[in-house]
Amino acid sequence: MNNYSSPTLAGIAGFTGYSGAELVRILSRHPAVEPVLLEHRESGERRGPWNGRGLKRMPCTAESVKAAGLAAVFLATPADVSMDLAPALLETGAAVIDLSGAFRLGAAANFERWYKEPHRAPDLLAEAAYGLPEFCRARIAQARLIANPGCYPTAANLALRPLVRAGVIDRASGVVCDAKSGVSGAGRKPSLKTSFCEVTENVSAYAVLDHRHVPEILRTSGLEESELSFTAQLLPLDRGILETIYFRARGAGSAEEILEIYQRAYANEPFIRLYPSGQAPDLRAVARTNFCDLGIHFDARGGRGVVVAAIDNLGKGAAGQAVQNMNIALGFEETAGLL
Amino acid sequence: MNNYSSPTLAGIAGFTGYSGAELVRILSRHPAVEPVLLEHRESGERRGPWNGRGLKRMPCTAESVKAAGLAAVFLATPADVSMDLAPALLETGAAVIDLSGAFRLGAAANFERWYKEPHRAPDLLAEAAYGLPEFCRARIAQARLIANPGCYPTAANLALRPLVRAGVIDRASGVVCDAKSGVSGAGRKPSLKTSFCEVTENVSAYAVLDHRHVPEILRTSGLEESELSFTAQLLPLDRGILETIYFRARGAGSAEEILEIYQRAYANEPFIRLYPSGQAPDLRAVARTNFCDLGIHFDARGGRGVVVAAIDNLGKGAAGQAVQNMNIALGFEETAGLL
Amino acid sequence: MNNYSSPTLAGIAGFTGYSGAELVRILSRHPAVEPVLLEHRESGERRGPWNGRGLKRMPCTAESVKAAGLAAVFLATPADVSMDLAPALLETGAAVIDLSGAFRLGAAANFERWYKEPHRAPDLLAEAAYGLPEFCRARIAQARLIANPGCYPTAANLALRPLVRAGVIDRASGVVCDAKSGVSGAGRKPSLKTSFCEVTENVSAYAVLDHRHVPEILRTSGLEESELSFTAQLLPLDRGILETIYFRARGAGSAEEILEIYQRAYANEPFIRLYPSGQAPDLRAVARTNFCDLGIHFDARGGRGVVVAAIDNLGKGAAGQAVQNMNIALGFEETAGLL
Amino acid sequence: MNNYSSPTLAGIAGFTGYSGAELVRILSRHPAVEPVLLEHRESGERRGPWNGRGLKRMPCTAESVKAAGLAAVFLATPADVSMDLAPALLETGAAVIDLSGAFRLGAAANFERWYKEPHRAPDLLAEAAYGLPEFCRARIAQARLIANPGCYPTAANLALRPLVRAGVIDRASGVVCDAKSGVSGAGRKPSLKTSFCEVTENVSAYAVLDHRHVPEILRTSGLEESELSFTAQLLPLDRGILETIYFRARGAGSAEEILEIYQRAYANEPFIRLYPSGQAPDLRAVARTNFCDLGIHFDARGGRGVVVAAIDNLGKGAAGQAVQNMNIALGFEETAGLL
C-alpha cells in the first residue's frame, strides 16, 4: 500500500478536453495524488482563468515524464494521438491509462474494422488490460497499459455480463441496448452536430447498429454481434448516459431472481448500486459520481426484462473509472478520491 | 366538400393546456375554420396577454355549443372531464374529437385495467372511431365521436402496423419500443416531475412495461401484450417524441424490402415521410408539423431491424392529428391548415 | 399594388444559415412571393432532407438573378460576402436586402472603426436605407439597397427612440441597455463559444461597452456614445432577445405618461405590442413572430424607468423584419406572410 | 479552535429543498462537521433513494436538537417557518443560521413592507447578524442567530459596497443592477412559473423595481432606494446568478483604479476572485463553488463602468455561504469544506 504522505504525481494529456478537465477535477481532491498538466502541440482552448491554476505543467514527452517521476499518465486524447504517445510513455515506467478507443479491442484487425484506420501500435494490444474493474481487476493491478472502457460499453457491460453469465437471457431472441448520451460524450472539438442550436430541443439517433463501441460490448458481455441491437442517441444535456436494455428470459423467472443475480455479481462492488425491483435510476442520481446505478423490471408474460443503467459519461464512463483504474494499478484504495 | 367562404366554428375545451393552445394556433390559420374558446370551471392559467386575443369565447356547455352552431368540439381535457362532457356535447350535433384517453380502448374493462378508474360513459365506447387516419379514415369520416390517439401510440403504430401486417417480424422474439418524450406530453399542470430543475440535465424512465398507452399500441398494431416491451422516457426538451423500435425479421430480408413495405402502405399519405435506408429522422425535422418521419435500418446478421419514428407530440401526437381528424369528419381537405 | 396571382420570385443567399432558413420558412407561406435558393461557393451544410425541398435553386450570380427576373434578393451572409455580392446584384434591378452589418453605418469610417476591416463597397453606403420600418418606412419604399438592422439595435431602438424624441430621458444620467440573446444570433458556423456543453447551464457577457451593434443604436436612437452603456449576454436558448433598458426621467412623470408616448409613436404599427404598465413581456410571447413587445415600469422615487423589450432574434431581429422590408419595397401589404 | 477529531453535529431543516440538499452535500464533505437531517411536518418529497442515505435523522424540535447536542442548525425553510422555528431552537444553545429572508432586514416594519406579512419573531431582529462574511465577519463570530443573505444581494453587495465606500460612483446618476438567476433560486415547490415547458426557451423579468431583495442591497451597499434600479430575470438553467451592474464614475477614473479598489477590499478574502480588467466571469466559473467572481469594465467616455458578478445561487448565494458562516461562528477554518 502506497504512502499517502508524499503525493504521487499523475500526468494528464488532453487536459483541455471534457474528460481531461474531469480528471483534473477528481485528482485535485485525491488524497494521495497530485495532477500534472501535460502540454502537447494539439492542446485545445482552455476554459476560464481558474482552471488548472496552480497546478504543475510540463511538456507531454517521455523525457519530462521520466524526469519528473510521474507514476501514471492519463491519455485523454483521440485514439490516433494515444497510439502515438503510448509506446514512449510506457518506457518511462509510468502506468499509462488511455481513455481513447486505441487499445480496447484486443486485435489490430478488430480495431481496423471499427475505427477504419490502421493501428499504429499493434504490439501493445496484447498486453493492454481492459479497464473495467468489476470484471478485470486482477489484470488491471498488473498492467502497464490500461485501456479505459468506452462510456456506452461501461454501462452496457455492467448491465449485461451478469445476465449473460447466469444464462438467463434467451439469446436467440436477441438483446436490445437503447443508449442515450449527453453531448460531452462527443468531445469538446466544435462541430455542427454538437452546436447548441442543433442539439437543444432535439434528439437524434446515430450509428444505428454500427457504433464503434459495439465490439467492446460484445467482447466483455459475451454476446454475439448478431444477438445485439445497439442504438446511440444524442440528447440535449451535458453529462450522463442512460441505457435501456431489453431481453427475454429463458424459462420462467422473476424480477427478484434477476436482482439476486446482480446482488451476487456486485456484492462487494463500491460503485454499483442496485435499485429495488421496479424502480429505475435517472441521470441525476449519478451526476458527477463514479456510480453505475441499475434498475430491474420484469414481466413474466413473455419473460420480458428491462434493465435501466445510468452513469455519468465523464465519471464512471471516463475520468472517474480511469482514476479507479489508477488506484488499482498504483495500489491505492480503489475508491480514493471517488466518493 | 365544404364551402371555405363562411367559416365553420370549432370549439376548444381545455385551451389553456399545451394541446389546447396548439389547437388554437393551428385553427387560427385554418382556411375554413374559426376557433372558439370554450370556458369551463377548471380552465387553467392563461399564457400571456396575446394568447387567444380576439377569438370568440363561450361557456363549455351543450346549450352554448348548440346555440352557436359549432360544427366540431375538441376536448383537450383530462380523461375524466372528457367522459363527463362528451355525452351532452354529442347531443348538439357537433363532431366531438377527444384528445384524452377516455374513448380509445374500445371496452370499459380495458379502460379500467389501464386507467384504474371506472368508465363514466361506457355507452359511447362502441361508436367512438379511433382517430389514426392512416388506418381508420373511413370510420373517422362517419363518426360523431373521435378518440384522438395517444402521442406514443401514434408513432408506434405508424411504425409497427405495416410490418406486422406484412408478416416480416419474428414475433416470438418480441418487439421493443423505446420511447422518448418532451415534457409537454405530461401536460401543463405543475408537478415536481415536470419542474425545470428536476428535468434539466436529466433523463428518467417511467411506467416501464406498464404504460397506459400500451393497450392502444396492441389494439392497432396487432401485437400481443407478451410480444411488446415498451418503455417511456422523459427528456429535457419541450416538444417531440422519438421512438426507436427494434425487431427481428422472419427469414432473410433487406432494408430495401422493408422500405418497400412502408412505401406501399403510405404511398398516398400526406403526413408520412420515409427516409432513405440507413438515415434516421430527428425531432427538428418534425417540430411544429403534423408529419411522422420514419427511418429504417436493417442488418442481415441476425435479421436485426431498427425503425426510428419521430413526431411532434403536440402535432401528429395531439393537436395536429386532431385537426386532421376534424378535416376528415367535416369534409375538408385532409391537409387543410396543416402544411 | 402588386398582383398576388403570379408569384414574385425572391432569392435567398445564405439559406443554410439560421436567418436564411427562417427566410425560407417565412417566404414559403408568403401569399405573393416564391423563395428561390441562391447557391454560392460557401453555402454551409444543409439541415435534414426536407429543408428547401421542392424549391427553385440557382447559382448566386447576377446573371442568373437577372435571367430569372428575381424582384428581390436577401443576403443572409457575413458582412464581407455581402459587400462583395451587393454591387453586381443591384445592377440586376432586384431590391437587395442585406441582413449583415455591411451597409448599416452610413459612413465607411464608422464601419471600419467597429468592424475592424476596410469597407469594400463604400459607394453604396449613402444610398442604403436602414430597414427599421417603424422609423424609415418612406426611404425603404424607395430604396434599391436595404440594410436590415441588427437584432440588438432593433429592440433597443424601438424601445429608446420614442423616449429620446419625447425628451423624457435625463440623458446626463445615462441609459443602460442590458441585452440577452439566444445562441442562434451567433450564426450557424461551429465554434467553441456556441457548443452545447459550453452554453448550457451558463450565461456569459461579451463585448461589454464595445459591441459592434452600438453605433446602430446611437444612429437611430439619437443617444451619444458616452450616454449609452450596452452589454450583450449569451443565454442557453435557441431564439430570442430580451433587452432591459434603464433610464432616469427628467422631472416628474408616470408610467402612464411613458406608455402614452409609446402609444402615440406606435399607434398604427402592426408589429409593436404595448403591455399594460407594470407587466413585462417574455420571449415566449414573441417566439416565431415578427412582433416587438414592450413593457414599461416606472417608479417616481428617483424617476427610475425600466422598459423590457422582447423580439425573436430571427424574426423581427432578422428574417421577419427583412420580409417586412421586402413587402414595403415591392409594394405588398406590409404584414403579408408575417401574421 | 475546534478539534477536528470528534465531529460536530449540524442539523438541517428543509433538507429536501434545493438549498437544504446542497447543505447536505457540502457538510457531508466537511472535515469537522456531520450533517443531521431535521424532519418536520412540511418536509417535501425526497429525491432518489441515495440522497441523505446513512445520515442521522431526528425530529426538528428544540428537544431533540438539545438532546443530540447540535452545535448549529440550518433553517433552509420558508420565512414563515423560520420565524416559527428560530426562537425555540436558539434556546438550545445551537447557532441558528437561517437561509430565509426572515431576519435580514433589521426592523419589523421593513420586513412587513417588503414581505407583506407581520413579523412573527420581531424580538430577534436586533441580534441577528447579517451573514455576509466579507463585511460582517466580527458580528457573525459572536452571533447566536445569523441571517444568511439572499442570493441576489450577495452578488450585488460584493460588487457595490467597495465602490460606494470608495466614493467613486456618481450616485445622482443612479446605479443599475440587472440580475439573472437560474430556476433553483425559486425553490423546489412546483409551480407553473418554474415548470420546464414554461422556462425552457424563455426569459422573463419579474418584480421589476420591486423585488424583496432590494432592501438587503440598500442596507449593505449604502445606496438609497431612489438610486438603485434592480430587475430580476429568470433564465432557463438550474443554478447560477449573473448580475451586470452599471454605474457612472464621479470625475475621471480608469478600470485599473476601480480594480485596485476591489483588490484592497478583498485582498484577504478566500472566496472573491477578481478578473483582469475587461474580462467577465461566466456561470461555469463558479458552478458548485462558494466563489464570487467579479469582472470590471470601464470606458472613460462618460465614465461608464460595468461590473459583472457571478455566483452559484446555491453556493455563495445560499448553502455555501451558510457553511462559511457556520465555520466562522463555530471557530472552524473559514474555508473548511468549501474549497
Image (tube, coloured by chain):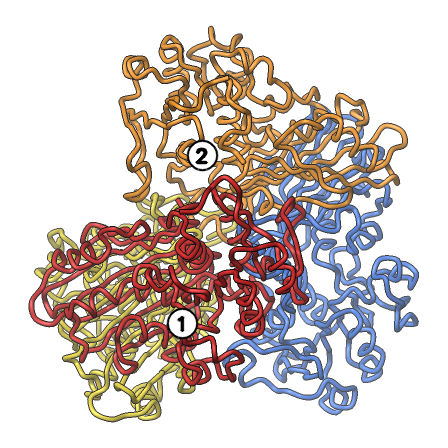
Chain colours: A yellow, B red, C orange, D blue
Crowd rating for badge 2 (residues with CA inside 10 Å; few <14, some 14–19, many 20+): many
Task: Tell me the subunit letter for badge 1.
Answer: A
At horizontal 24% and vertical 74% (from top left) the residue drawn is B175
Residue A191, relative to residue D44: is it above or below? Answer: above
Residue type at numbered disc 1: Asn
Residue type at numbered disc 2: Ile
Residue A72 location, quadrant: bottom left
Q: Is residue C283 left or right of residue B305?
A: right
Position in image of residue B12 (x %, y %): 56, 57
Dot 1 and dot 2 residues touching (CB under 8 Å): no
Crowd rating for badge 1 (residues with CA inside 10 Å; few <14, some 14–19, many 20+): many
At horizontal 60% and vertical 14% (from top left) the residue drawn is C138
Cα–Cα span, label 1 and label 2 = 48 Å
Foreground of the two, D289 or C296: C296
Q: Which mark is residue A290?
A: 1
Foreground of the two, D339 or A32: D339
Q: Quadrant of the N terminus of chain A?
A: bottom left
Q: Is residue A130 left or right of residue C115?
A: left
Q: Which mark is residue C26?
A: 2
Residue A289 location, quadrant: bottom left
Position in image of residue D227 (x %, y %): 83, 40
Position in image of residue D114 (x %, y %): 84, 57
Task: Inspect this view and state whether residue A95 appears.
Answer: no
